[in-house]
Image (cartoon, helix red, strand yellow):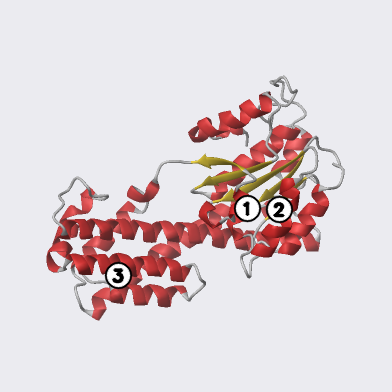
Amino acid sequence: MAFTDFPAQQNVTHILQRSLEGARVAHAYLFTGQRLEELEGVARALAKTLNCRSHAKRGVSNLALDSCDQCLSCRKIEGAIHPDVQWVRPESKSRVVTIDQIRDLMQIIHLKPTEAAYKVGVIVAADRLNVQAANAFLKTLEEPPPKSVFVLLSTEPQRVLETVLSRCLRLNFTGENGLHIMHASWLKSFSSMAIESQKGLLGRYRLLGSLLAQLSQIKAAAEKGVSLQSPLGQYDDIEPRLREKWEEELSAAIEAEYRRQRTDVLAGLQWWFRDIWLQTLALGHDFLSFPDLSAATQKIARRISSNEAMENLLVLEQAQRLLGSNVQEALALEVTLLKLKL
């Protein structure tokens, strides 16, 4: 994939192309956005463009302005086998980027390039850098080797250490905000069930079943989508240690994508419960995030107080925090749904 394959992000890719044209490539970028998969794609396109051998369109710096996607260098980067383009991902068990991973990356980056014009290090989910890894990374960020570029990717930039943030050029890949349209049909079904689930346990467990079924579908889709991007499916004869590394990275990437989408689902619920709270305050329809669900919103708003509606929002916020701390998912969601005032 090249920059032209990201038409929705032209504003940002044009910034990158202008820096290439004027030989003003930053030594470190922080790409932020809603989807790690998209951020990885743009990072891969940048690595290809920096090292493309064939593309005719070049700036005054003689750097390509986009990748040809066909030369040997581009194909190696696409296949994740280029020796001068290194990817670091959170480990599967702890889901953090460790100091050992960063030390290995620094050792490779400081070596003379094997065949590339630029050495590129991509850190996926940079918000998962633990403190020791981030501190080990700082010295290289302050004094990077010549002809080296680091690209940090994050869907949660607020969790990246400030000392790291301050040393990166941040580019925000904003797409369409999916909260109002993502999982819309499921949320409509959920709101209808919520009307009938006022206090009875059976109704609450119906809601729990609906939520868990939705999350199960999301996880299956995440596994399928992320697996298609893995180099595991592109090569038959893989050295065992490399296969193990790629399998661990795939497992971590699937988990990260699932967690991101789970956060989106719960965020959608939070916005709907915010609508309920607004209705308890009689603020009208102009402020609703989900006007199509106003009938269900009003029914629930009429039978709870504004204080209870606010408590619902706090319960959902607590659920997001708990799920981010590796608690048992089904149990956390069960407790959450039993606490909601409907």
Asked if one can make out residue 73 in the rendered structure from this viewpoint, the answer is yes
Q: At 22% across and 62% down in the image, what residue appears? A: 192
Q: At 63% across and 51% down in the image, what residue appears? A: 164
Q: At 58% across and 44% down in the image, what residue appears? A: 31
Q: Amino acid at mark 1?
A: Thr
Q: Amino acid at mark 2?
A: Leu
Task: Give how far apart the Cα atoms at labels 2 and 3 are.
Answer: 47 Å
Look at mark 3 in the image and give the residue it sits on.
207
Residue occupying the far bottom of the picture: 201
Asked if one can make out residue 247 in the rendered structure from this viewpoint, the answer is no
Task: Give how far apart the Cα atoms at labels 3 and 1 are.
Answer: 43 Å
Left-right relation of 250 to 309:
right
Look at mark 1 in the image and give the residue it sits on.
163
- Name which quarter of the figure residue 131 lies in: bottom right
Q: At 21% across and 68% down in the image, what residue appears? A: 307
* Residue 271 percent coordinates (x, y): 31, 56
Q: Nearer the viewer, mark 2 or mark 3?
A: 2
Q: Nearer the viewer, residue 306 or 123?
A: 306
When the figure is inspected, residue 253 is found, relative to residue 38, above or below; the finding is below
Look at mark 2 in the image and give the residue it sits on.
138
Query: Is disc 3 placed on a helix, strand or loop?
Result: helix
When the figure is inspected, residue 25 is found, relative to residue 80, above or below; the finding is above
